[in-house]
Amino acid sequence: MALFDKLASAAAVRRDVISSGGLVPFGVTVERILSPTEGMVAGRRVILGGTNNYLGLTFDPECIEAGAAALRSEGTGTTGSRMANGSYAGHLALEHELAEFYGWPQAIVFSTGYLANLGMIGALAAPGDVLVIDGDCHASIYDGCKLSGAEVIRFRHNNAADLDRRLARLGERAQNALVIVEGIYSMLGDQAPLADIAAATHRHGAMLMVDEAHSLGVLGANGRGLCEAAGVMDGVDFVVGTFSKSLGGVGGFCVSPHAELGLVRYTSRPYIFTASPSPATIASTRTALAALRSRPQLRQRLWHNVSRLHAGLTAMGLPPAAEPSPVLAVLRDSRDQALADWQQLLDAGVYVNLMVPPATPGGISLLRCSISAAHTDAQIDQILAAFRALPGAGHAVAGQAALA
């Protein structure tokens, strides 16, 4: 039983956060999905306010039909990795379309967004190299760093000056360094100061990777993410992203202006040894990417909803932790308060994400909303009404001052 000893702390956390209603916030079962914005949880109809379904494409008729057609014609799965029997024409077509979307020559599709980070970092860096990452980077980035065996240096979150100092200390070793940041950070919804980060990176001869998981389809004139919005497409070496947010599917990718990206296929263990995405997944993703490109009104509607919710929360004294983005995090004073508030919101018919330490930066506890283009004004109003009923609404929250 010694192998289970290390799980004791996880069991204690689980006991501590079980709500009075018997629900575990970190494993809620959505018993039935009714639409991109509604589902059944614990036998009640709720608004889904924490799904990352930014463009609302999970129920798009064209995406569904593309997936269904591929399922009928190509079967349920590839049953093999990309290096064995798992590269179909659809995989190659999606890679071509992603590369064309970014205006770059190369793209690689992975089975998940997590594997995209794991596979790219593990292939690009090795012992003797240096990975310089934002301290608030996603777990998949940290895991990729471990896989690589490279030296890892963290710089202060969104602090380009600290990045510059740490690269300067590396001297010539900076030329063997890869800097990794995110476009929109998934917990607080804040954006990287990407122009300053790119300038610092290139000043020292390092390379730059940006994870646009939460910013693809959200930022930029064409939805390419923060790299486009910040005007630094020419200053980025690798963009990693996922299909599981704005594109409403499962999978991940990397695009790059460097022709050498193609060599990653022969060195990336998560690419070589993982079954490739199913034909239906690829087909629906290709259709979703086409929708992202041809229907800017989706992005416009998303930002309408983001602005409406951000303004409403701010007006009631619960300002989100960062500037407007599809991720709106409301800080609470303690884990217990966050848990109680999460349950109250659910009882009011609104499901959001409960985030508590150690998953959150700085030991904070928060209620995380992620907004969709598919939310209606009435649903945004219902979310606001549920938050307005929380204890402390209408007054400043202590956690907000602490973050500032």
Image (spheres, rainbow, N blue to C red):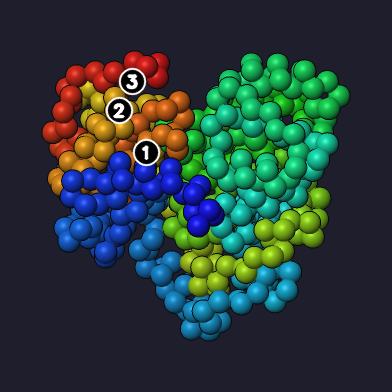
**Local crowd at mark 1 within 10 Å, few (<14), some, or many (≥20)?**
many
Q: In the image, what residue type sits under mark 3?
A: Gln
Asked if the residue at tag 2 contacts the one at tag 1, i.e. Cβ–Cβ closer than 8 Å, the answer is no
Asked if the residue at tag 3 contacts the one at tag 1, i.e. Cβ–Cβ closer than 8 Å, the answer is no
Q: Is residue 366 left or right of residue 256?
A: left
Q: Position of residue 398 (x, y in %)?
A: 29, 18
Closer to the eye: label 1 or 2 = 2
User: For residue 58, what is the image quadrant?
Assistant: bottom left
Q: Position of residue 70 (x, y in %)?
A: 51, 77
Foreground pick, 4 / 128? 4
Closer to the eye: label 3 or 2 = 2
Where disc 3 sits, the SS reads helix
Measured Cα–Cα span from mark 1 to mark 2: 11 Å
Q: Is residue 45 left or right of residue 259?
A: left
Q: Position of residue 232 (x, y in %)?
A: 64, 32
Q: Residue furthest front?
A: 1
Q: Position of residue 347 (x, y in %)?
A: 15, 47
Look at 65% across and 74% down and name the residue there: 80
Residue designated by label 3:
400
Q: In the image, what residue type sits under mark 1?
A: Met
Look at 19% across and 19% down and name the residue there: 395
Where disc 1 sits, the SS reads strand
Look at 43% across and 66% down and name the residue there: 63
First in sequence: mark 1 or mark 3?
A: 1
Where disc 2 sits, the SS reads loop
Residue designated by label 2:
334
Residue designated by label 1:
355
Residue 258: which disc?
none
First in sequence: mark 1 or mark 2?
A: 2
Seen in the picture, residue 204 relative to 131 is either above or below; the reply is above
First in sequence: mark 3 or mark 2?
A: 2
Look at 55% across and 42% down and name the residue there: 139
